[in-house]
């Protein structure tokens, strides 16, 4: 993991986390945008969206999965899920965004508090430790409809969260 973290740290851009927008109590404001509402997603739409984000690389690895490399060397996968469900419109109802980092056995004790802190302070993604790896996942659903602009925002927030996690891991390991 040290090699993975050191390599990523060397290329990582400064992370600027914006303040969360407060939600007002009461009724939901009516939608005023003009972007089309997506009730499902398909591979072509997701591929065009990923390529439009300006990532260093986007590779299609299967009919429903892509690997993305950002300019600051974060590598993550984007996979369409819950596809062609009976009783639902054609397409996929979810999008899984997943990054992972390997770790050395001796690093586990130092990284458990990082995982716990990230999970309690940042709700944009779930961080898990499984075997000798740390995973960060964000699952986006189309329930009720979303815009592709919203999906792009989800990708951007995931990248910011992954950068925060990586920075915390580097600090915890003293690298």
Image (cartoon, rainbow, N blue to C red):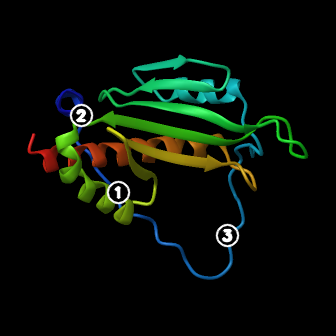
Question: Could you tell me how far apart the alpha carbons at marks 1 and 2 are, in whole angstroms?
Answer: 18 Å
Instruction: Report which quarter residue 173 is drawn in.
Output: top left
For marks 1 and 2, give the one nearer the viewer.
2
Chain-order first, disc 1 or disc 3: 1
The residue at which mark 3 appears reads as: 29
The residue at which mark 2 appears reads as: 12
Check if mark 1's residue and mark 3's residue have beta carbons within 8 Å: no
Pointer 1: residues within 10 angstroms few (<14), some, or many (20+)?
A: few
Label tally: 3
Q: Residue at x 26, y 43 (%)?
A: 166
Check if mark 3's residue and mark 2's residue have beta carbons within 8 Å: no
- At mark 2, the secondary structure is loop
The reply, left or right, for residue 130 in relation to residue 47 is: left
For marks 1 and 3, give the one nearer the viewer.
1
Pointer 2: residues within 10 angstroms few (<14), some, or many (20+)?
A: some
Chain-order first, disc 3 or disc 2: 2
Residue 55 on image: x %, y %: 43, 25
Q: Residue at x 44, y 48 (%)?
A: 157
Q: Residue at x 30, y 62 (%)?
A: 117
Q: Nearer the viewer, residue 70 or 126?
A: 126
Residue 59 on image: x %, y %: 51, 17
Residue 93 on image: x %, y %: 73, 43
- At mark 3, the secondary structure is loop
Q: Residue furthest left?
A: 174
Q: Quadrant of the N terminus?
A: top left
For marks 3 and 2, give the one nearer the viewer.
2
Q: Residue at x 33, y 26 (%)?
A: 71
Chain-order first, disc 1 or disc 2: 2
Question: Could you tell me how far apart the alpha carbons at marks 1 and 3 are, in whole angstroms?
Answer: 22 Å
The residue at which mark 1 appears reads as: 18
Residue 140 circle label: none
């Amino acid at each position: 993991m040290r090699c993975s973290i050191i390599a990523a740290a060397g290329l990582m851009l400064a992370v600027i986390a914006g303040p969360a927008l407060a939600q007002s109590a009461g009724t939901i404001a009516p939608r005023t945008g003009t972007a089309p509402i997506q009730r499902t997603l398909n591979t072509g739409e997701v591929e065009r969206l990923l390529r439009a984000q300006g990532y260093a690389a986007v590779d299609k690895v299967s009919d429903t999965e892509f690997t993305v490399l950002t300019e600051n060397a974060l590598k993550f996968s984007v996979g369409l899920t819950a596809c062609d469900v009976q009783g639902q419109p054609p397409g996929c109802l979810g999008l899984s965004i997943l990054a992972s980092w390997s770790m050395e056995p001796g690093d586990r004790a130092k990284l458990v508090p990082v995982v716990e802190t990230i999970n309690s302070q940042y709700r944009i993604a779930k961080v898990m430790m499984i075997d000798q790896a740390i995973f960060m996942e964000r699952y986006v659903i189309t329930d009720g409809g979303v815009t592709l602009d919203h999906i792009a925002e989800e990708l951007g927030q995931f990248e910011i969260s992954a950068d925060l996690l990586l920075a915390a891991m580097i600090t915890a390991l003293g690298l």
